[in-house]
Image (cartoon, helix red, strand yellow):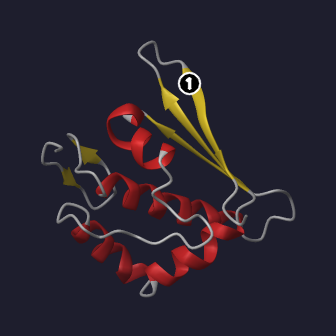
Amino acid sequence: MGVAAAVSPDGVAAGHLSVYSPIDYLLFRLFKAAKQLERSPNRKIAAAIIEDYEASFHVPLSDSWIDWTHPELFLRDNMIVPFIKDRKRETPNLESEIIRRIPDLDEIWVFSVGNNFDIHRKHVIKPGV
């Protein structure tokens, strides 16, 4: 069980989030990347560089908690709900937009940051497949 954390309006989190909140936050950020890349004629690759990969993302990503062809928010933790609610002011249909846009990415690369600030690619995800 994670330590309670607060997610500020700009999306910065302090402390450890609970089990599902990090994945919801990752899906939101990947949605934003997909939205920025939607008009690109080139391959669309979104990269996520995660400092707390082992604590918050290793199990959900390694154990395939997300159906990448139909990625849905979990919205099971009170920590992330206010953040998502604020984002819905900008994108009222956020959940359906996440489901629609993330599979349009060709690949998602997930990197972890090590103790010496070295970066390692942990996952290459092909969401539309």
The C terminus is located in which quarter?
bottom right
Q: Position of residue 108 (x, y in %)?
A: 64, 51
Q: Quadrant of residue 10?
A: bottom left
Question: What residue is shown at x 12% (from left), y 48% (from top)?
Answer: 4
Q: In terms of image quadrants, where is residue 94?
A: bottom left
Residue 66 at what x, y percent from top left? 49, 61
Q: Position of residue 60 (x, y in %)?
A: 42, 49
Q: Position of 128 compared to 51: left or right?
A: right
For disc 1, the marked residue is: 119
- As helix, strand or loop, the secondary structure at mark 1 comes to strand
Residue drawn at 17 percent across, 66 percent down: 78
Position of 34 relative to 14 (above/below): below
Left or right: where does residue 85 sit relative to residue 87?
Answer: left
Q: How many numbered marks appear?
A: 1
Residue nearest the viewer, comparing 5 with 71? 71
Residue 109 against residue 117 in the figure, above or below: below
At label 1, the amino acid type is Ile
Q: Position of residue 22 (x, y in %)?
A: 35, 52
**Which quadrant holds the N terminus?**
top left
Residue at (22% x, 41% y) in the render: 16
Q: Extreme bottom residue here?
A: 92
Front in this rendered view, residue 74 or 95: 74
**Left or right, 94 with reference to 4:** right
Q: From the viewer's perspective, is residue 55 above or below residue 64?
A: above
Work out which residue is located at the far right of the displayed protein and give it.
Answer: 41
